[in-house]
Image (cartoon, rainbow, N blue to C red):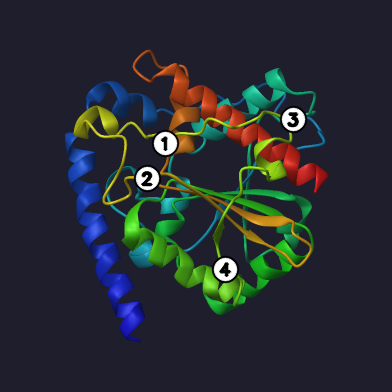
Amino acid sequence: MRSRNILAAAVAALTLFGAAFALQRGRSFDDEENSPAPMPADAAEKTEYTFARLKYPSYRGGSMGWSMRGNWTVDWPKADRQFVQGVRRLSRVHTRSVEQVVDLESDDLFNYPWLYVVEPGHWDLPENQARKLREYLERGGFMMTDDFHGTFEWEIFMDSMGRVLPGRPAVDVEEKDALFHVLYDLDERFQVPGIIMFYTGRTFEYDGVDPKWRAIYDDKGRIMVAIGHNMDLGDAWEWADHPRYPERYASLAYRVGLNYVIYSMTH
């Protein structure tokens, strides 16, 4: 109970930070982020790969500002649709042009072997949803986590992951792991920041100074959960076409995402 109280206090502090950030954001990004992404003409096309985004319950219903719909909606749908355009252009994977939102209350989850989770430093999975996600991962599913930062959010993330995969540690991914080489050789990896850098002057958030490339493996050495901590690939995808967002960050974000997609299909 004490652990849960600490996590709740941490989320309250982060919520206040999010509110302050939402108030100070410049209009150039704010107006565009609040504009819905256009629906592609081929949205209903049947393809071999679909970007699946997980809808999950948040502490206190999500943070303030741009994530009032719930933390799972951050950068949605623009980041998803811009990323899949990159998958289409940079690989031969037949990719659907729109994302699919899935949740842990439906078996539809099992139709999508690749799953993206944004801001898991704010999620709070009840036992029944944790069991469903465990089944998904143990049956061969692959989950990518993104956009959570610092010690507090790591603890919140691991609190739910402890229910999903009890006893399985999150470890640093070794340089030789196929995750870093299955398509692109990701020998040079650096922190991919969100657009908060334009307002704080820093590429990190909270105390998340160093980017962490971590994973949770199954008994056969397959990565079930690829963990990007202290970075924000979703923002890089979303703002890749914006003149203020640096190309070097966007390029790495696309290469990382593409490696994860190909890994999930081949391992």
Asked if residue 33 is positioned above or below residue 209 in the image, the reply reads above
Label 3 CA crowd tier, 10 Å (few <14, some 14–19, many 20+): many
Q: Residue 206: where, in percent of width, then height? A: 26, 50
Is residue 20 among the parts visible in the rendering?
yes
Observer-side mark, 1 or 3, equals 1
**Few, some or many C-alpha atoms within 10 Å of disc 2 (few <14, some 14-19, many ≥20)?**
some
- Please name which of the two marks, 2 or 3, marks the residue nearer to the observer: 2
Q: Residue under circle 3?
A: 95
* Label annotation for residue 191: 1
Amino acid type, callout 3:
Thr
Q: Position of residue 102 (x, y in %)?
A: 63, 53
Gap between marks 2 and 1 measured at Cα: 7 Å
Q: Mark 4 highlights which residue? A: 169
Upstream in sequence: badge 2 or badge 1: 1
Q: Is residue 110 left or right of residue 225?
A: right
Q: CA distance from mark 2 to mark 4?
A: 19 Å
- Asked if marks 3 and 4 touch (Cβ < 8 Å), the reply is no
Q: Are marks 2 and 1 in contact (CB under 8 Å)?
A: yes
The residue type indicated by label 4 comes to Pro
Q: Which residue is mark 2?
A: 210
Q: Amino acid at mark 2?
A: Asp
Tag 1: residue type?
Gln
Label 2 – label 3 distance at C-alpha: 33 Å
Viewer-side residue, 139 vs 104: 139
Name the residue at 40% across, 46% down.
230
Badge 1: few (under 14), some or many (20 or more) residues near its Cα, within 10 Å? many
